[in-house]
Amino acid sequence: EGVMKGQSKPESGEEVTAEEQIEQIGFGRFQMIAVVAFVCFIVADGMELVVTNITWSVLPRDEWGASDYARGVLVSVSFFGFVLGALIGGFTGDVYGRLPLLYAHSIIFIPTSVVSALSQSLLQLVVTRFIVGVSMGLVLPTAVSMISEFTPQAYRGRAVILLPGIAYTLGQVLVLLLGIGLISTYGYHCLDCQWWRWMLLAGIVPDLTGIVLVYLYIPESPRFLLYQGKLDKVAEVLKEMSEINGTSEKLVNGGRCKALGDGEELVDLWKSTQELCAEPLVRTVPLAVLTWCFLSVTLFTQVFMWPIYVETLGFDHVTQYWLMTLVALVEIPGVILLLLLVDARESAGKESAGKESAGKES
């Protein structure tokens, strides 16, 4: 199903790349399970993105001696942890593999979320939210890398966009809906109010679901194993993927792939720097970075400032949460449009590849 039109199956005995094997396996049940697992991780991240800000007003601030300045510290500290985690994950993932980072994320995230929900002081909450942020930074780049490395080219763009595009928004919406339910049940300023602790715990549910799916179905990235020279292990992973998809007969040479060339490395910092400084990347990369920075400003303005502004409008707290939910949902049409544009571009690419292949054969 995922094999591009015009792309013929390599002959038996012919040396093929891991990428060609993945194209033969296609997009099926395995990739769907992987998408669901990685979406669960990013949903948990999306919940953590907003939870401390939207629960600030109900925290025992007087008891903890927390000022308004502390709100900025508490909300920001997760993002500082995220940056640190992403830097650590980017390097260690290329050295030790993608799969260990997913387990490391959950090993850190789940117990720290529990400790965070049980916080008895502002300092404890700040420290635990920082550690939660570090674990969030480990999982996002790892999930994006793995889904791109498991997915055939024709579906890769949409799968990658789906993770940060839809899953983050879904996480924000879910934690806000949970807040609406808790407020409706217990009230906002209830006596000795503790329902905010359940909101800090909520991210454990999708994260635990994701790590269970990973444990049951998701192997190490074949691309990472290939760069490690573990060709037998690459073949095992490709066989496992094809069996889950029901496309074992499409594998070439039992899933065996040719080794990389002598000059091919997983990370070549000098070569990557040279490529960034050459055409066309020297022009397109700065533009992409500036565009992403602009989009990030709007995203974090929504996450940081919108809940604070809504609190000044005089609505009841349930209405405030509904307004935050609606603003979060506004992102989804834009992401759907982007998915459609990517789909149209990939369809055009497949048609072009088919014509080119047909021309060569004739």
Image (tube, rainbow, N blue to C red):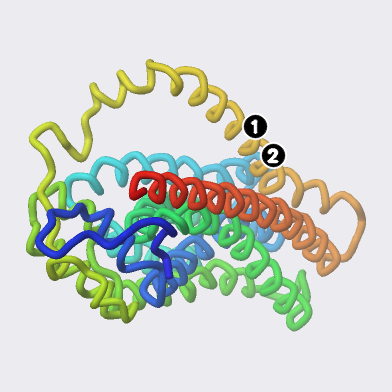
- Residue 310 x %, y %: 83, 52
Closest to the observer: 34 or 247? 247
Q: Is residue 46 left or right of residue 313?
A: left
Tag 1: residue type? Phe
Which residue of the protein is positioned furthest toward the right in this rendering?
314
Dot 2 falls on a residue whose secondary structure is helix
Closest to the observer: 134 or 117? 134
- Residue 177 x %, y %: 70, 72
Q: Residue at x 71, y 46 (%)?
A: 302
Closest to the observer: 164 or 234? 234
Corner quadrant of residue 110: bottom left
Q: Is residue 239 left or right of residue 43?
A: left
Q: Residue at x 56, y 24 (%)?
A: 287
- Residue 250, placed above or below residue 291: below
Dot 1 falls on a residue whose secondary structure is helix
Label disc, if present, on residue 298 of the rendered structure: 2
> Gap between marks 2 and 1, in whole Å?
7 Å
- Residue 361 x %, y %: 33, 50
Label disc, if present, on residue 8 of the rendered structure: none
Tag 2: residue type? Thr
- Residue 162 x %, y %: 54, 58
Q: Circle 1 is placed at which residue position?
A: 294
Closest to the observer: 103 or 257? 257
Q: Is residue 124 visible?
A: no
Q: Residue at x 57, y 70 (%)?
A: 197
